[in-house]
Image: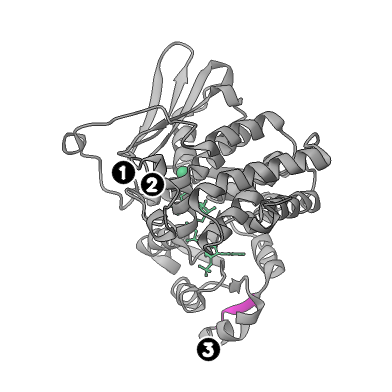
Amino acid sequence: MRSISVLGATGSIGESAFDLLMRAGGPKAYRTVALTGATNIARLAEMARALQAEIAVTASPERLADLRDALAGSGIDAAAGPEAIAEAAARPADWTLSAIIGAAGLPPGLEVLRRGGTLALANKESLVAAGRLVMSEANRHGAQILPVDSEHSAIFQSLAGEPLENIESVTITASGGAFRDWPLERLVRATVAEASCHPNWAMGQRITIDSASMFNKALEIIETHEFFGIDEGRIKVLVHPQSIIHAFVSHRDGASIAHMGAPDMRHAIGYALNWPQRGPLPVAPLDLAEIGNLTFATPDEQRWPALRLAREVIRAGGAAGAVLNAAKEQALDDFIAGRIGFCDMAPAVERALDACAREAGFSADPTDLEQVIGWDRRGRHYAACTAGAA
Ligand code: NDP
Ligand code: MG
């Protein structure tokens, strides 16, 4: 029986993974090693009981007593804190899904790679913040990374082993998020509630707001560069409101191979779970006659400065990705807390990138976690709204 762990089990991706695991037979089909969460203790305990996990871990030490209570009599171990999550990730398992949100996903993801495991990676932030480190640890330890972000799963499936020299370009699509058709003047006043509604995908709140600001697509441009080793000039973005084609790969002979599917993350998660086989998934088949039209447009980088910043970060190299990711997380915190407006997020990230470049330059790639954390702190510091006058 295959053993699995799910990091970030209580989130949107974690719930979709749980759904797939339970449909497959739950503990009859998989041996669950570890499940992790943060604030949603009741759900974490419920999932751990349903899958008969060995251990459930919360990121918050102050919630350990509640987790222990919720697991009483189950025989499931409980632990808490970021180190405990990293230790849980280090426990041998055949397949580990990293679905923690934000840079907090990086340390446990590295633990999976260091034990030579298979890492199904939804946590794009780890590739943005530390792409070289993540990929080199995977190579060094013979670990396998399977992309779970829908566009990257689509590229992975469309590349089908083709060597990079045969690839002309890779195009990822963007729905355009909640504000695709809003005039710029209205965007300035966009509220958190308005930014938290996605037209096509049901996702966690943070990535939904990132979709509205296109920072999600900015992270994905960098993720494409880091994971597939494709240079920035050959990574394209198209606005595709129907979210049916997730990505396509254009070959030098003029052929493009596109990946199509309903906007349901259970496809990409299930593909990674069944890889290298394909198995049945509870995803509705496409009815293209019903959909009727697939439309595409070039995104306006004036309207979406995040896309320009992603390209600048790739060109700068080194630690710029760690700064962009951290600064974006800080700006998003400030927007959600009502401290800054929707259109203030990209300038905050740009300010942090400029300040960090002036202070230390981005020349060298971070070679260990401590260096990434150092850049992450700088990025958050300069992006914070209190640093606005600096
Ligand atoms: P959610 O916010 O829904 O869930 C995040 C998960 O991480 C929850 O289990 C949460 O616990 C846990 N968590 C939060 N903070 C911490 C922390 N500091 N340390 C450890 N665990 C923590 O996020 P999503 O599921 O939307 O996204 C997860 C990842 O997948 C992100 O990297 C995102 O970019 C990526 N992704 C998501 C997609 C989607 O459709 N949602 C699509 C493509 C990629 P709790 O809920 O208990 O507080
Ligand atoms: Mg995506």
Give the extent of the magenta segment.
Answer: 75-79
Residue receiving disc 1: 262
Residue receiving disc 2: 186
In the displayed image of the protein, which residue is found farthest to the top?
A: 253
Colour convention of the picture: one colour
Q: What kind of element bears circle 1?
A: loop
Dot in front, 2 or 3: 2
On whether ligand 1 comes within 8 Å of the CB at mark 3, the answer is no
Who's the residue at 70% across and 54% down the image? 387
Q: Tell me the number on the disc at residue 293.
A: none
Mark nearer the N terminus (2 vs 3): 3
Asked if residue 130 can be seen in this view, the reply is no
Dot in front, 1 or 3: 1
Amino acid type of the residue tagged 1 in the rendering: Ala
Q: What kind of element bears circle 3?
A: loop
Please name the predominant secondary structure of the magenta segment in the image.
strand
Q: Is residue 53 above or below residue 261?
A: below
Q: x and y percent of residue 73 in the render?
A: 53, 89
Q: What kind of element bears circle 2?
A: helix
Structural distance between the alpha carbons of marks 1 and 3: 41 Å
Asked if residue 313 can be seen in this view, the reply is yes
**Mark 2 near mark 1, Cβ–Cβ under 8 Å?**
no
